[in-house]
Amino acid sequence: MELASLSEEMTDEEKKNIEILIATPENVQPEIEEELENFGFHFHRRLDSRYWAELMKMFHLKLDHFLPFSVLPVGYNKPFVRIYMAKSHKDRPLKQGVMLPEYVFPIQVGADNCNTRIADLLDNKGENISYKNGNYSELTGLYWIWKNKLCCKGTGDGDNRQYYGLVQYRRMFDFSADDLLRLADNDVDVVLPYPMPYEPNIHAHHERYLKEADWNALLAALKELQPEYADAFSEILEQQYFYNYNIILAKKIVLREYCEWLFPILERAEELSVPRGNERRDRYIGYMGETLETLYFVKKSKCLNIVHAECRLIV
């Protein structure tokens, strides 16, 4: 029912007794609030990313499925942490002022495709696929991290005390000082955002973004390069929980192994897709990356210590 029609059918007293929860992306919530106020609905509340994360924490604690980061005991040893924040010259300015933690470094993704510079770090320096940003989106930043920060292999023990990650301009982990002390002393391998639940499953959700031909290309690439994961692919797609946004923090060695697994599959899927990647710019490889992140870490959940944290949306 449209808001105007609903408003006409209700008295002012009835409107006072209805609480409206605005559960939409935060960037459109102010407009919805204004519209509600115009029609006399003054009892409303935003479900922002902080409230959503708290709900997810309680939900997953009850299910005992996706372990919340914050339930781990606080340790004493602060590890080396470096998170890169993907930014694009197309990003709209933030309405909120944001003070980045000392361990977060903005990196301009797609720098090869424009002359505008919005960050000191560029994803077209060193070994890179910056020119593919139209399809890979924030994953050109992850590729840069892999090739320029993770490939210099040190001792395994040293790598286990170093954490690298990727967030986005508008979406980032909201870690406390205590959270950083939880990493090494609890031997955390990976921190991921709370997975988003979809009905009836994540395949139905992603059909909105990927064509059937793209799914087929991705599955063919998996069968060719990682047949074990190809066997689990359909089962993973039938589940409800999905890791969005290609956001991750992991031990150096764990993130390196993930990238070594991920990017050959994406490259092969790009070669098999019709039209091929260099003939389109629709972020379809970025969507594939989200699916593969879900596939990889759900399948690895029994051998990796994976925890989950709030992913704050900044508007």
Image (tube, rainbow, N blue to C red):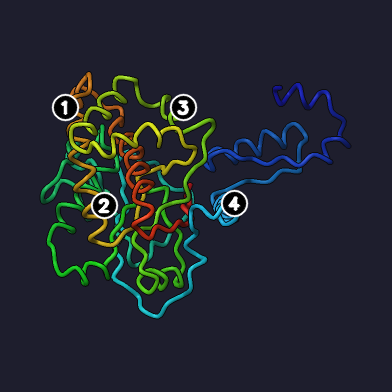
- On the picture, is 122 further left or further right than 1? left
The local secondary structure at tag 2 comes to strand
Q: Quadrant of residue 133?
A: top left
Dot 2 or dot 1: first in sequence order is: 2
Q: Inspect the image, locate mark 4, and give the three-letter code of the amino acid beneath it.
A: Phe
- Real-space Cα distance between discs 1 and 3? 25 Å
* Circle 3 residue: 204
Dot 3, crowdedness within 10 Å: few (<14), some or many (≥20)?
some
Q: In this rendering, is residue 58 above or below 241?
A: below
Residue at the image point whose x is 30% and y is 30% from the top: 284
Which residue is farthest bottom? 76
* Circle 1 residue: 271
The local secondary structure at tag 4 comes to helix
Q: Inspect the image, locate mark 1, and give the three-letter code of the amino acid beneath it.
A: Glu
Residue at the image point whose x is 40% and y is 41% from the top: 92
- Real-space Cα distance between discs 4 and 2? 34 Å
* Circle 4 residue: 59
